[in-house]
Amino acid sequence: MAVTLDMAKLDLREVNTALQSAAKTHSNDAYLIENPRGSHAMACGLDGALDVTIKGSTGYYCAGMNKEARVTVDGSAGPGVAENMMSGIVTIAGDASQYAGATGHGGLLNIKGNASSRCGISMKGIDIVVHGNIGHMSAFMAQKGNLVVLGDAGDALGDSLYEARLFVRGKVKSLGADCIEKEMRPEHLKMLAELLERAGADASPEEFRRYGSARKLYHFNIDHADEY
Amino acid sequence: MCGIVGLFLKKDAMRPQLGDMLTDMLITMTDRGPDSAGIAIYGEAVPGAVKITVQSDTPDASFAGLADALSDALGAQVAVRTISTHAIVTVPAEQSARATAVMEARGLRVMGSGETMEIYKEVGLPRDVADRFGLRDMGGSHGIGHTRMATESAVTTLGAHPFSTADDQCLVHNGSLSNHNRMRRVLERKGVRTRSENDTEVGAAYISWRVAEGASLGEALEGTLKDLDGFFTFVAGTRDGFGVVRDPIACKPAVMAETDEYVAFASEYRAFADLPGIEAARVWEPEPATVYFWER
Amino acid sequence: MAKTPQTEPRQSWTFSNDVNSEIRRAAATGIYDIRGGGAKRRVPHFDDLLFLGASMSRYPLEGYREKCDTSVTLGTRFAKKPIELKIPVTIAGMSFGALSGHAKEALGRGATMAGTSTTTGDGGMTEEERGHSEKLVYQYLPSRYGMNPDDLRRADAIEVVVGQGAKPGGGGMLLGQKITERVAGMRDLPVGIDQRSACRHPDWTGPDDLEIKILELREITNWEKPIYIKIGGARPYYDTALAVKAGADVVVLDGMQGGTAATQDVFIENVGQPTLACIRPAVKALQDLGMHREVQLVVSGGIRTGADVAKALALGADAVAIGTAALVALGDNDPKWEAEYQKLGTTTGAYDDWHEGRDPAGITTQDPDLMARLDPIEAGRRLRNYLNVLTLECQTLARACGKSHVHNLEPEDLCALTIEAAAMAGVPLAGTSWIPGQSGF
């Protein structure tokens, strides 16, 4: 039986304190948060296995820096959802605003709707699955991890990409500097199949194209100066 | 750096609630802009007349006898409705420029004018600004509001948004323009006057200038993408609707919601939390470098 | 027949040998010059100010017997656990990666012995510095290398870096030579590549969004840690005011002489305002908001002596931060390595190619053999000594002005030697009551 926290009655600090201490001490398995009304920094900094469901839409930085917890937003999420996430699973039933999963180090960010611009910016090991489309400048300077998009990608996908792997099923409006399409090898298909399975995505790995870094900007070369 | 809200009603039956809905949205954006707040509200038109919104820091002295003085100067009936530091002066349409000159000569600050638009803005917390003007009780077809965290120009009434640089046009802005000084000088040479040091006013003046030159509002907003530099989310109001545009980098937040009853705009989703039917609304973010427009 | 007199060969001021050598370098390589350190050009500085001292109208404190307090508390506005420092001098942010682990350890040892704080940098927190720093400020940077909630919680304060004096509006450049396995691992980057740090944060832009980011950082750290905002000396009045509005506990203001591990020389020398010119506008912004001393101001960029410290405090700062001076105290650019500097085509005092990782002093390097040259215990002791001297000097000047706390120094205790310094510091030109440019910033 989940513990219910009503944000019509409790303020952010009370809700986060309850969640953070429960995560730390494993004192409860499940929390339900009602009336989030787009509040910022909800369920951020959780450090431990805990199920949190937020009934409604959230503001900036929901589930920021999450470790181990499973946070579900039963609505849409504002900018920077699961930013710098370390581990655990964050699920968004609706859409995610810009910077979803920014700088994330680990865990799974599962967005059932669309994500807007800069999805996975500077990601550092997180897996992000977007069931809909993503906006422009997604995976900008993405360093590590996997970004999987079932729909389309906006302009300048993977600009200044490092070693993150990008998989897109739909159309890519344009690729950013130093981002190229790459061969889909068996190990990618296998990894992608597992990730799609974990995300509950109804798609087959063969339908995706893989994009990665051309690695031409890794060392300054005068012939690529116009890419800077 | 700021919070923006906008609300465009599709159904006339909701018009009496416009101020109430917009006020809640505005107050929710207080954290983004605690310095000052303002609202442009598109209400009832008086046939053949123009409403001029003026402001004074000494309203008791400045507005006393204003109606008589204007009536005498213009030789026409002039109505003055005083609300706190503002007054809505209704004059025959053809006398608008003359009335403006007379009032500026009396030291009044012109906030804007138009057939339906009224503008209210002051320094202070959005809640206090809304209370001072009784925004909750205002009705209308659409309205745009702004809460300001001043960047490089002073925290004054004139520095508050919305900025109006032509009849029934207004602009609010979240972001910071990086070539506004040069654009201000370009516009000055074309005879377009600005009243403050504010970057947003330059954006408003640019749009008004383009419209005066024959561009549609859509074309003028398109023009901002080429001619204005820096970071911006603009919402521009007109007599019949409003338009939205974000710069190509599009870092400053913007979210929109649409139902059968309204189109709403805000810097953050929070501002929508109390809107009727928001759970079922279509909610999305405007794309970069793309002009959106709603008209009745 | 008498020889026709010749004009002496004349070098161009515009096209000097320095300038021409840079043109040749650019033509040969096709890339801008990258270097470490801060601005080398001469700009009005604290040297151009003098203390008036006490005499007949004011009475000094006795040098060795009457106490002159130097303690400073940072983060009194919102944080549950403000930072208490014994001295008004802190160690500025310098990254592991730019500096060796030994150098970070030495900074921690020296600062801790002197009763002050150190600061991490771009690249994350290392055991060397956390373990040896009693008080450690964790920088929150656009790159977020190594950023994690555990380190955030074990920091004593969080410094959101918006800008840096050497490069307001720019990001750092750590070139491939220093991206060793350990550095790369901490940053989640491939070994040996050029690393371009972003100039804007990935998940917010502008003070209205920063306010929300600060809320998140406070929620994650139980509202305990002071939140600093570091800005480069760009538009100090507005930038300080916006930092306060965004919710800062402390504003760190870095003037153009502030150092960097590696950035374009054109950026270092041509962007930003001198430290001296930044302080008064920043203090004015705090005063206009009723926040002077409520939100503390830490000033950095070219602080070298106790006189610099005292002058910065007199102009309204609550504390200063040192970077380059601390490295020199550890042994950077020491004449004992002159032969090696010569081999690198430079000389003692001029060595600034910190990004190349070949520092003979073993400080700005990741090379194990070079790193081993720096003994962190000995270097830490040197830094402690130097910090103590800065403090003693600052106290000496404060006592001479009749102050029992260094924070009671005022702009009125100063005069300026040049019109430029008088205008920038907002103090009278010596011997006059004239403050140029007093009508505004």
Image (cartoon, rainbow, N blue to C red):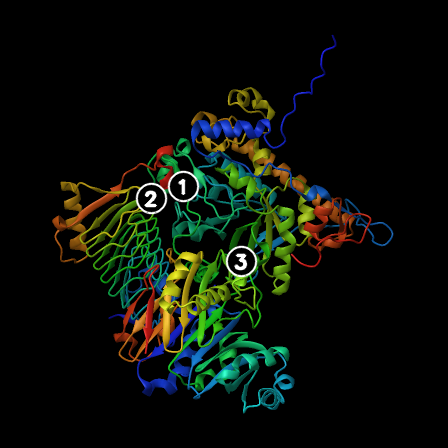
Residue B182: which disc? none
State yes or no: discs 2 and 1 in contact (Cβ < 8 Å): yes
| Residues flagged by tags 2 and 3 on a common chain | no
- x and y percent of residue B203 in the render? 47, 64
**Residue closest to the eye, C30 or B75:** B75
- The subunit letter for the residue under badge 3 reads B
Q: Secondary structure at mark 3?
A: helix
The type of residue carrying mark 3 is: Asn
Distance, label 1 to label 3, CA atoms, is 31 Å
Q: Which mark is residue C196?
A: 1
Tell which tag, 1 or 3, sits nearer the viewer: 3
Q: Which residue type does callout 1 highlight? A: Arg
Judge left or right: residue C337 versus residue A56.
right
> Chain ID for label 1?
C
Q: Are marks 1 and 3 in contact (CB under 8 Å)?
A: no
- Quadrant of res C14: top right
Number of numbered discs visible in the structure rendering: 3
Q: Is residue C98 left or right of residue A221?
A: right
Q: Secondary structure at mark 2?
A: loop
Image point 63% across, 52% down: which residue? Answer: C279
Q: Is residue C176 visible?
A: yes
User: Rounded to the nearest whole Å, what is the CA distance between mark 2 and mark 3?
Assistant: 33 Å
Task: Find the residue positioned furthest to the top.
Answer: C1
Residue C260 horizontal/vertical position (percent): 51, 40
Q: Is residue A59 visible?
A: no
Q: Which residue is mark 3?
A: B181
Q: Mark 2 or mark 3: which is in front?
A: 3
Q: CA distance from mark 2 to mark 1?
A: 10 Å
